[in-house]
Image (tube, rainbow, N blue to C red):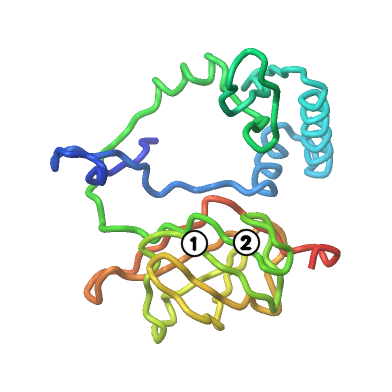
Amino acid sequence: MKLKYCLHPLPISDKEEECYAKFQEVKTLSEEELINEISMYAGVSEPQVAMILAARNIVIKQQLEKGNNVRDSIARYYLSIQGKFKNKEDRFDKKRHKVLANISFVKSIRFNFDLLKLTKIRAQGKLPQPIKIYDTASQKTNQYITPSKISTIKGFDMQFEDNDPEQGVFIKNHTETIKVENIIQHSAKDIILFIPDQLPKGSLSIIVAGKNHKKDKIKRGTLPYTVKEAPKHSR
């Protein structure tokens, strides 16, 4: 299978002809979809896979909290400190420094990238680019959305026509898609909306569909994170 990519002009380049490449038609698997894939591949039940993955995440987190590094067959997980120190006598200051959790893929994974086959396709204009969604009820970003409460989407090229049923904001799981009917206001960079009363179950994708120009075909962009309905204790 060939991976599709197209070229776009570099916005910060002094040379008009310089471009950057971006993969197209990329799907982001939710945790549920990943568990389903592993279950079918390994021949074990989905609850067993979910339990093992949850335990693995807990163990890695615990080891990082102890200051240890973790290395498995896919990646190395480690901590680092961000920020400059004035001199050798300086100390860690939460206002100036930050501890970061990092992941670095092992060479065997990186090596396999050389085997990928790519094919260039023609760019089809700017796609909507939702970057983050902030849920006002839970005060979380790219994690939760709360039914009947306000959320704000930030991004680029997210303009759409209100009177077109195929344009706007959509919420989707792996079997069901609903449209957000109550949009408070929207522009190319900001969308403020009321989340519907009833949401699909499980991990949710946020999709913005719109046009750059009236004669364009409708283009869709998906938030690069899946979100879930906010638990009641966080509302």
Picture disc at residue 4: none
The mark closer to the camera, 1 or 2, is 1
- Residue tagged 1: 154
Q: Nearer the viewer, residue 117 or 181?
A: 181
- As drawn, which residue projects farthest toward the bottom? 163
Q: Nearer the viewer, residue 119 or 137?
A: 137
Q: Nearer the viewer, residue 211 or 79?
A: 79
Residue at 25% across, 72% down: 213
Other-residue count near label 1 (Cα within 10 Å), few / some / many at <14 / 14–19 / ≥20: some
Other-residue count near label 2 (Cα within 10 Å), few / some / many at <14 / 14–19 / ≥20: many
Q: Quadrant of the N terminus?
A: top left
Q: Quadrant of residue 113?
A: top left
42 to 228, vertically: above or below: above
Residue 119 x %, y %: 28, 37
Q: Disc 1 on helix, strand or loop?
A: strand
User: Taking 41 as reference, is 15 left or right?
Assistant: left
Labelled pair 1, 2 in contact (Cβ < 8 Å):
no
Residue 235 x %, y %: 79, 68
Residue at 71% across, 74% down: 147
- Residue tagged 2: 173
Q: Amino acid at mark 2?
A: Asn
Q: Amino acid at mark 1?
A: Lys
Cα–Cα gap, marks 1 and 2: 21 Å
User: Taking 50 as reference, is 74 left or right?
Assistant: left
Residue 138 x %, y %: 73, 63
Q: Disc 2 on helix, strand or loop?
A: loop
Q: Quadrant of residue 137?
A: bottom right
User: Taking 26 as reference, is 184 left or right?
Assistant: right
Residue at 25% across, 42% down: 10
Residue 36 x %, y %: 69, 44
Q: Quadrant of residue 172?
A: bottom right
User: Taking 141 as reference, is 187 left or right?
Assistant: left
